[in-house]
Image: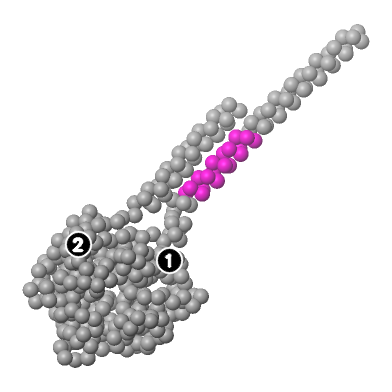
Amino acid sequence: MTRSRSSIAVGMGLWTIVVLIALRGVADAKSELQLIKYKMPQLYPESFDWDRKHDRFIVGSTVLGKLVTLTDTGAVEDFVSDSDLEGQSEVHGVFVDARRNRVLAVVEAGRGEFDPQVARLVAYDLDSKKRTLMVTLSEEGTQPYFFKDVCADNEGNAYVTETTSNSVWKVTSSGEASLFVTLPQYEILQSEPMFAQAGVSGLVFVDGLLLVSQFNSGALIRVKVSDRKVEKVKVADGLTMSEADGMAIRQDGALVVVSSHTAWLLSSRDFWHSATLVDKVVLEKTTYSTSVAVKDLRVYVLASYLHEDLEGLSREDFQIEEIEFPADVANNPLYLLVIVGMFGLLVLIWKFQVNQFNKSYTKKRISNAESLHARGSDFILVRD
């Protein structure tokens, strides 16, 4: 009995330690969300991506016309000095093509919303920083193009969104550029003229598909690369993602879409014919988030402050913020460990109480039996 009580007590102690460690882990995970602050006058970034190989972010500037690198500690420096672009271009989309050890960037010469400009797609080697590609997407004096975001498929072809014509352009691995597909304009939700004409924006490549966000309608569009078949993704409950901009695919296959005010987490079980809203996070509108990047399963949003640039303001303080979806927190293995630990602790407490009850009950029965035995002996002595 003593050994049983001792083992139960030890078990309770061990389970208590497990639960406390798990609770501490959950609290630490919540408190470790990163806020990376950095300084660079007039950077005004619009897009960024994570360079896993070199453990850094690569950020594009719409004002300075260059790419910079940013570490977790906030150390920022120029990625490359390209005299053909720096100081006279805007960098819009940025994509790290890890398969080919390169970073792709969409750049436009000159400044101004939807003005006819020369747009190019450039690529740099991540190690040597040597420029490996420069392809012209539009020529000066042609229709007013506004190229936005970029991604790449498994064969090295790049895809670039052009917002004013709701189109996606393709740049082959050999550097040939052409119009790939023109997408429908879905119902416009924006009232401001500048936003109303902003069509397709962010895009990602996944499982032979291009998923494209349409800024002015909030629609998510699916393009099958092999036959260019286009369809609108049916998002559950008729969700429209107002001002949908940058996008990124997580390692678990979930899609993260950001706007200046919200980040949405979507999943699909039918190759993105339809999607389910897993969760969403409200973002601080004053930072004007435009892009999202994934570092493993951790999600980071880029504070662009582009609205201040449009107002002619100056700024040198910028930031990248890690966000966490409540659904991910609820599915955290540490929470499961806490629940299992609490259940185990309750079972041990119950067993301890039952053990104590059985001991007390047995002791009481023995005492009663001894009392009855003593009375019986007295009765016998009286008869004699």
Disc 2 on helix, strand or loop? loop
Label drawn at residue 268? none
Viewer-closest of 79 and 14: 79
Horizontally, is 123 left or right of 298 in the view? left
Residue 367 lies in magenta, yes or no? no
Q: Nearer the viewer, mark 1 or mark 2?
A: 2
Quarter of the picture containing the N terminus is top right
Of residues 317 and 126, the one drawn nearer to the viewer in this rendering: 317
Task: Judge from the rendering whether residue 103 lies leftward or rightward of residue 235; answer left or right.
Answer: left
Can residue 254 be seen from the camera position used here?
no
Please give the name of the residue rendered at 44% of the width and 51% of the height, measured from the top-left corner.
334
User: Can the viewer see residue 305 in this picture?
Assistant: yes
The residue at which mark 1 appears reads as 280
| Quadrant occupied by the C terminus | top right
Amino acid on which the number 1 mark rests in the picture: Lys
Among all residues in the image, which is located at the extreme bottom? 142
Q: Nearer the viewer, residue 200 or 289?
A: 289
Separation (CA) of disc 1 from disc 2: 29 Å
Furthest toward the right, the residue is: 383
Q: Quadrant of residue 231?
A: bottom left
Image location (x, y in percent) of residue 209? 35, 79
- Please name the residue shown 30% across and 82% down the image: 194
Is residue 351 shown in magenta? yes
**Magenta-colored span:** 337-354
Q: Which residue is mark 2?
A: 316
